[in-house]
Image: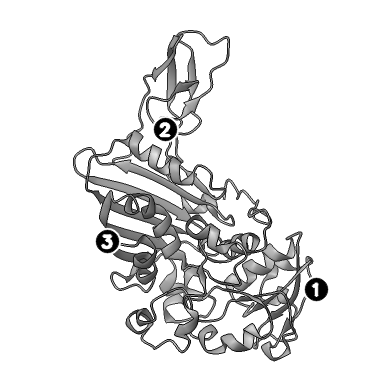
Amino acid sequence: MIRASIVGASGYTGGELLRLLRFHPSVEVRQATSERLAGKFVHNAHPNLRGSTRLKFSSAAELEPCDVLFLCLPHGQSMTRIDEFRALAPRIVDLSADFRLRDPTGYGRWYGREHPRPDLLREFVYGVPELHRDALVGADLVACAGCNATATILALRPFFRRGLAGNAVVEVKAGSSEGGNASSDASHHPERSGAVRSYKPTGHRHVAEMLQELGAGEVHFSATSIEMVRGILATGHVFLDRDLSEKDVWKILREDYAAEPFVRIVKERSGIHRYPEPKLVAGTNYCDIGFERDPASNRLVVISAIDNLMKGAAGQAVQAFNIMHGLDETTGLEFPGLHPI
Amino acid sequence: MAECPVCGAEIELTADVVVGELLECPDCGSELEVLEVDPPELGEAPETEEDWGQ
């Protein structure tokens, strides 16, 4: 059994990791830390786990050596405490933004701070298996991608990497769990309920990852909070440099994703589920991708849907973990979702 | 094998398929009609579209 511990396990991504790893056949969850809830059963923070584990939260000061540490800390903490964590485990999967960017100057530009350990940035593998599977095999350090970045990159990359487009506008509709489990004025129920709120029309931090992983071109990204707890719907407007038929687009997406266990092409001719829809992937590790070619212009609309806590965080982390350890990458991630939901 | 005329999916036809038979593409969900059996050829079957544009 692989001994795993989760640092910062009282948040939503930590809870999802606990849910996934608790039933993973090759993993023993040794510790889950929370300074606020140390000594309390994990089901105090994650009531869905009641009855499935008697694990209690520990303080990070009580962490013991293990095989893998999953870091679910607020941004800025992993980068300053990485040596402490590496002394405890030979393998680290970081779910924060702290090691996603390879270029240290990106942290100054996008996160407003200098990175204290730029020497480690190129040692971390960006944790999207569809892009970096080979590098993940046997990797010791993995930085999971941002949720909006995951949805956007998987949708756009087939077109950017072929040089079919170098310019896209992406609008993301995001659920409230993207904001984490800390309350704020913005999350107060009378303010949040029913909201359709532009919260980042420009300058979203995840754009740094998009530009890094897409390699070239421009991504004009906006994010909107909507009445949803889990999920992301990314609608990308790709302006093609050459004419493509819908059949051509099918071919491109099949070339990249037909063998991917967690990417599905969703484009039905009829019915109500013709394009990706976040609630249909809630709780799953799927990224559904659909598209429509605008016959009146060079615009290709590419649509992707993920669960931000799963493919956009904990599910991606477990998929990467499986690949790191030479396990079947779908292990522990087989849940197909619920319908209706 | 026949190709879906809409999305290009490879579709396996049964040995007893006949001209005029209707089937559904497993990838794009298009309703297809068998136009020829040897060599196999599929065409789009006519369908009624929903109007979502209110």
Measure the alpha-carbon separation of dots 2 and 3.
Answer: 34 Å
Q: Tell me if mark 1 has few (under 14), some (14-19) or many (20+) residues whose alpha carbon lies within 10 angstroms of its own.
A: few
The reply to whether residue A95 is in sight is yes
Whether A244 is drawn above or below A40: the answer is above
The residues bearing labels 2 and 1 have C-alpha atoms spaced at a distance of: 47 Å
Q: Is residue A196 visible?
A: no
Question: Quarter-wise, where is residue B42 in the image?
Answer: top left
Q: x and y percent of residue B2 in the render?
A: 46, 20
Q: Helix, strand or loop at disc 3?
A: loop
Q: Which residue is mark 2?
A: A270
Which is nearer the eye, A262 or A325?
A325
**Which numbered tag is attached to residue A54?**
1
Mark 3 — residue? Answer: A217
Mark 2 or 3: the one toward you: 3
The image's colour scheme reads one colour
Residue type at mark 1 is Arg
Label 1 sits on a secondary structure element that is loop
Residue at the (22%, 43%) spot, across then down: A242
Confirm whether circles 1 and 3 share one chain. Answer: yes
- The residue under the point 54% across, 63% down is A135
Query: Which chain is indicated by disc 2?
Result: A
- Could you say whether the residue bearing mark 2 is in a helix, strand or loop? loop
How many residues crowd around disc 3 within 10 Å: few (fewer than 14), some, or many (20 or more)? few
Where residue A195 sits: x, y (%)?
39, 66
User: What's the residue type where badge 2 is placed?
Assistant: Ser
